[in-house]
Each structure stands twice: as C-alpha cells, then as structure tokens.
Amino acid sequence: MSGAEYLQGFSKLIFESAVAFLKKKRVLSKEEYASLSDRAKAKAFTVAGYTAAEVLQEFLDKLTTAVEEGRTLADWKAQMDDWLGTHGYDDMNPGKAELVFRTNVQTAYNAGHYKSMMQAKKLRPYWMYVTAGDDRVRDTHAALHGAVYRADDPFWKVWYPPNGYKCRCHVRSYSERQIRERNLTVQTKPPVTVDLATGEINALRPDKGFSSNPALDAWRPDISKFAPKVRLAFKAKNSFVDK
C-alpha cells in the first residue's frame, strides 16, 4: 500500500467514525444534560433554549447529515432555520448556531481521529498535543503545545481535545523512530500550573465542562457484560479502559 493510499484510508476511517460518533448520541433537555457527568455528556446532545425532543432530534439529525455530506455551518444553519420556521420557531441566533455546529462537529472529528489513532497505537505509540498557535489560543491550552505523552498515558483521559468551546487543538501521533529523530521528550507527569499570588501548585485543567475525553467515553465498551476471564483479558490489553 502506498503512502497516499494509507492516508486516504486513514482519513476515511476518521470520517466514518465521526459520523458514527454523532449517530450514537441521544437527545436530552438542557436540565437533563446539565445533570450528567462530563463523561456521560459524550453520549448526549442538547441545544440551550430548546426543550422539545422533536426539535433537538432535528438539530442532531441535520448535524449528522452535515458531517456525512461535508456541509458548511452556513448550509446547516439555513436548513435548520427553514425547519424551525415551518414549525413555528424563530431562526437560530448566529452566535449560538456557530457554537453548536463547531463544538459538535469538531468533537465528532476528534473522536474519529482518536479511534483511528488507537488502532495504530502499536506503530505510533506517542501523541503530541498541538494548538492552533495564534493569539486566540487560551493560556492553559498554549501551555501544552508540543507536549508529548504515550498514547496510553492518563493525560489523554483529561486533555484530549476539544478542551473548551471553540477549542481548535488537535493531536498528532508519532512512531518511536520519529520521537528519536526529532529529539522529543516524552512527558510522564501530569501538567501543573503555579498560582503566582500564593505559589501554590495546582493541576492544569481544561475549561469547565471539558475535563473528560469524549472520544474515549464514546468508544468505551460496556465490559460489565463480558465473562470475568474475558473482562480481565480485555482490561490488560486495553489500558484506556478503567480498571
């Protein structure tokens, strides 16, 4: 297989996994969604200001179609506004529309990327946190730019992007040889920050509501139904599963 064919297959897997990620979500009201843990929110969907299940399901369905067909934010908003208008609702606020679209689409693509990278973990076992590298990157995210951790490090249970609304961070994978050639340092300790006023050292955390890896939780199997021996073997082989 040529390099181009490999990359094409890799991209196809990311795309298909992103669509699957959205199709596994279930709609909830804002109140129901707010009561969930960050981990559980990976499998749920809501839009502030809307309560009817029919409307929320339409939002999710059209987002899924947008990813499947490669539609833009403008395309999706126009379609959603048409549907809302015919059902007696006002058009979406442009700011809210962008927030809903970008957060959900980026999360879906990152989840797809996560799944593909996990499948290639033996060949490329090191992951690097990468920001957009401009002045709009949040300080907490910028502090991690270029940080390398093993794919199975607990760091990725917390810091796999997106790590906030409109977060543009992503992850790159590297082989052992690439790590050596680039003279990259593999981190083994969780990131910390220092309170300049008190000198206190605290764990560096993502934005509120983004402290769990939605990709890991979305693809996490329900191993409670496995036979005991199979469950133990699965845990031993897959370090991303909680012990």
Image (cartoon, grey):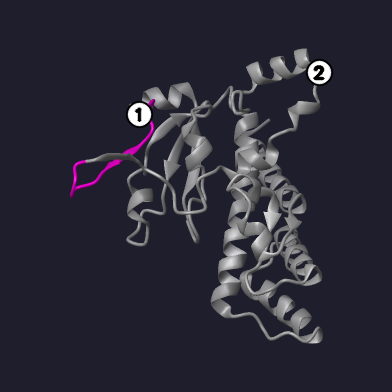
Rendering coords of residue 191 (x, y %): 35, 36
Q: In which quarter of the image is the C terminus?
A: top right
Instruction: Please say if 9 is above or below 44.
Output: above
The region drawn magenta spans: 187-199
The mark nearer the N terminus, 2 or 1, is 1
Q: In this view, does 175 lie to the left or right of 235?
A: left
Q: Viewer-proximal residue, 22 or 27? A: 27
- Residue drawn where x is 32% and y is 45% of the image: 143
- Residue drawn where x is 18% and y is 50% of the image: 197
Rendering coords of residue 222 (x, y %): 75, 32
Q: Is 104 included in the stretch rendered in magenta?
A: no
Please, what is the three-letter code of the amino acid marked with disc 2?
A: Ala
Q: Residue 4 falls in which quadrant of the image?
A: top right
Q: Distance between the residues labelled 2 and 1?
A: 41 Å
Q: Viewer-proximal residue, 14 or 198? A: 198
Q: Residue furthest top?
A: 229
Q: Is residue 175 left or right of residue 139?
A: right
Magenta-highlighted stretch: main secondary structure? loop
Q: Mark 1 points at which residue?
A: 184
- Residue drawn where x is 74% and y is 67% of the image: 56
Please, what is the three-letter code of the amino acid marked with disc 1?
A: Leu
Q: Mark 2 points at which residue?
A: 227
Q: Is 190 included in the stretch rendered in magenta?
A: yes
Rendering coords of residue 204 (x, y %): 36, 42
Which SS class for mark 1?
loop
Q: Residue 2 falls in which quadrant of the image?
A: top right
